[in-house]
Image: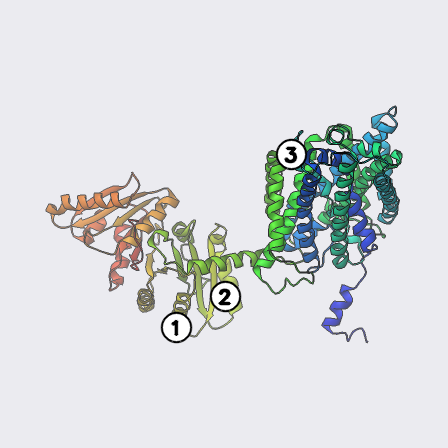
Amino acid sequence: MAEAKKTGLQKFFSSSSKPRVRKFSTFAGVFTPDVLTILGVIMYLRLGWVVGNAGFLGAVAIILLAKSVTIFTGLSMSSITTNIRIGAGGAYSIISKSLGLEAGGSIGIPLYIAQTLSAALYIIGFTESWLRVFPDHPYLLVAATAWLVLLTISYISASFAIKIQYIIMTIIGLSLVSFFLSPAKPVADFVLIGKFTDAGFWQVFAIFFPAVTGIMAGANMSGDLLNPRKAIPRGTMLSILITMVIYISLAYMAARIATSIELRDNQMIMVDKALFGPAVIAGIMGATFSSALGSMLGAPRILQALAEQETVPLAKFFARKTKNNEPRNAIIFSGCIIILALVLGNLDFLASLITMFFLITYGMLNLVVFIQQSMKIISFRPTFKVPRIVPFLGAIGCLLIMFLINALFSIIALIIIVFIYIGLERRGLKSNWGDIRGGMFLAIAERFSRMAMKFPRHQITWKPDLLVPIDDPKIWSGPLLFIKSITYPAGSLFAFTVQLREPESFHRDLDDLLQPIKNQGILVTSSVIEDRKFLHGARLVLQTLKAGMFQPNILFLTLSNDRDSDRDIQELVREAQRFEMGTLILRQHPRMAFGMQQSINLWLRDKSPNWHLAMLIALQLQLNCDGKINLVTATPNAHDKERLTDFLDRLNDQARLPSLTEFHVIIDDFNDALKAAPRVDINIFGLSDTLDFKFMRNASEWTRSSCLFVCDSGRENALV
């Protein structure tokens, strides 16, 4: 009974503390894999070459510049992990919970591939190091044996793999000590600034930069951490700072005990200059082995996290875990990809692409934090706060470095991610958490709205934004296809109905009615106004929308056979004029409807000021229906024909109407001219100040077409 009496808050905390198997501390789950991935083969085989080309201070500049990107990214990742409940998959989880499954998947899938192929690259590095000691051993046999050992370790358990990494960390530590205790005598010429003999600054930087990546190794274990919110920030930042000190110290030592020529020509300089060379060789092997192990631990967990949200095929198979929280199906599949990559051999092409995927991931993490900081939303309140300039510089830095390293591979990587995003978006993925996309775009819209309010609206930016009153959504037979032809592609539609009872039911009916036009990509909003009288509710809508930023500029009404509604139409037109809105009144022909919507008669009078909106609507219909416009006017006096033809011709030229536009001057009384006019799908007329409902109904019969009656607001200009 006591359990049944728990409050909702108690249930929340009790359910949130239900066990998910998370075993590892900050040191074991984050710091160790990060350090072992950062202190890799480049440190042993290429750092000396960097110093030989750049000199000590040049090498320090390269190290600090490269580290600045990972520092910014580490700070951003630390900030956001103290704000959300990060799940399995590390960066994938962070991006998915911020920008949605599509964005998370478009980054997570390439990141998984990069992590998997990185394991293959590290195994190749280990194999080459092994063959330097045992040159008679078969290459494929060494690589396959290393792969099998790594797969076995990762398959047994992450806990066992972490214990193996402790041994490797000890070996790497001993190798560094052996180098720092080098008996070599200091060189006479300590080079501060090198001549960059073999390559320029950015080429040297590009070769070194992969050495500082690897900060995701711990984040990828997020699903297995005891407390990822604390472990990831602490372990990541500590690993970045300690390895930075190690790299700068090694650069100083290399510059002190070897000449620039030795450093450039001998990639095994650390072995040759160490107190005990075999210790450094063991360190090289250990570094490549541990990096491969870190990738083989992280990659399957990214795949398993992707599968949990059904982002990848065979999701149920890859999402399975053992009782000990091991994603063994994902481990076996990843192992198969790695061995396939090893058999194919040359991975030089993929090596650059892998680096791009890592940089894109870093950049996206920084961008996520920058966006949330810029939105200034109350839900973003991390306990680890960083200035907004940090994620901004991190995102820009990642993008710039990508193109400095390899512009071609950068473009290829970005194209791949865009295609994955489009594919995932079409699948309509649904997550069990919210994200910031809607709020992000709303914040952007609000910011631009404030900017737009500083500038007056000009006729050159006119577009049709319709306000459509609907008396009853269940029986309204309004011409949605015609409305779409008026508003597409840049216009919008605000529809409303006025009801006093069952507003929720009318909301559903209104949504169902407007769904077809929403599917056309047109911005559609709707509302149900609770009021006793339709006219009173409609006036409230007009008054309310007048104060908004996104104001409708055209009132769209339909004229039926019910003459009782004429008075309401008259009143709404007056209200529209009072609020400087244009008016469209449609009289739909009961049999002809709109035909093919491909031919239009636009009726004009040479002295009428009320034709700008009519011409703009005619142009919208012509563009969307690929139709033809006829400019039509009538006069009882035959002597006026030449003058009126000249008037239509000048108007056609000034308004830049389509080349197929035809002119028709009908010599007859206006009512008779309607019957003699060319047969078209719709006739458009100007609307007089006093509405003649009898004429409006008759015009549809006389022309045997639907008729649209238009009144300008005074803010349109068809000649701009």
Label 2, label 1: how far apart the Cα atoms are: 18 Å
Q: Amino acid at mark 1?
A: His
Q: Residues within 10 Å of mark 1 (few under 14, many from 20)?
A: some
Q: Amino acid at mark 3?
A: Gln
On the picture, is 279 further left or further right than 313?
Answer: right
Q: Which residue is mark 3?
A: 203
Q: Is residue 70 above or below residue 537?
A: above
Task: Tell us which disc is closer to us: 3 or 1.
Answer: 3
The tag on residue 536 is: 1
Identity of the residue drawn at 48% across and 61% down: 510
Residue 299 can be seen in this image: no
Q: Residues within 10 Å of mark 2 (few under 14, many from 20)?
A: many
Label 3, label 1: how far apart the Cα atoms are: 72 Å
Task: Tell us which disc is closer to us: 2 or 1.
Answer: 1
Q: Which residue is mark 2?
A: 506
Task: Tell us which disc is closer to us: 3 or 2.
Answer: 3
Label 3, label 2: how far apart the Cα atoms are: 65 Å
Q: Nearer the viewer, residue 448 or 552?
A: 448
Q: Quadrant of the N terminus?
A: bottom right
- Say what secondary structure mark 2 lies in: helix
